[in-house]
Amino acid sequence: MFKLRRLGPVMSAAAIGAVLTVTGAGIAAAHSSGPAQHVAVHQAAAKRVPCLSLWAVVNKAGVLQRAGCPGTTSAFVGTGYQVLFYRNVRDCAYVASAGNAGSRDVPIPAVVSTVGRLGKVRGVFIGIVDLSGHAIKRGFHLIVECKQPGF
């Protein structure tokens, strides 16, 4: 009986080692995947689980810096910016403000306007002008609020 008690910690250590080995292999496989596979995983996740946090932070070049949902994209188009989400946002409210993506340099005041993106039900168009009314390139923060399903 005494010998069996001494095997308990050894068996527990062996089981923990096996779990860590399997977990480590999974983490290594995830880190070895390329960017295309990484995007595909996020797009698949967006299709499985509805993401309710629709927001984006975009720099003045139109590059998405961070977003609340996988599959969100952004671009500078013509005189403003577009942000595309994974779902239809046509019946939602859009709120945007000029802002940098980082934690430095408060931007010069600007007027920011939002509207649904023409021809793209998943998109929002953001126009930014200076206080004289001239279109400018400026980073911004966008929040899209939609009614919850079932309401």
Image (cartoon, grey):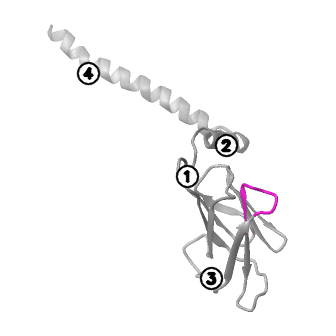
Q: Residues within 10 Å of mark 1 (few under 14, many from 20)?
A: some
Which residues are the magenta region?
117-125
**Amino acid at circle 1:** Leu
Name the foreground residue: 109 vs 35. 109
Q: Quadrant of the N terminus?
A: top left
Q: Disc 1 or 2, which lies upstream in sequence?
A: 2
Expressed as whole percent of the image width and height from the top left, the position of residue 5 reads: 19, 14
Q: Which structural element holds mark 3? A: loop
C-alpha separation, residue under disc 4 versus residue under disc 1? 45 Å
Q: What residue is disc 1 on?
A: 52
- Name the magenta segment's main secondary structure: loop
Q: Which structural element holds mark 4? A: helix
Q: Residues within 10 Å of mark 2 (few under 14, many from 20)?
A: some
Which mark is on residue 107?
A: 3
C-alpha separation, residue under disc 4 versus residue under disc 3? 60 Å
Q: What residue is disc 2 on?
A: 43
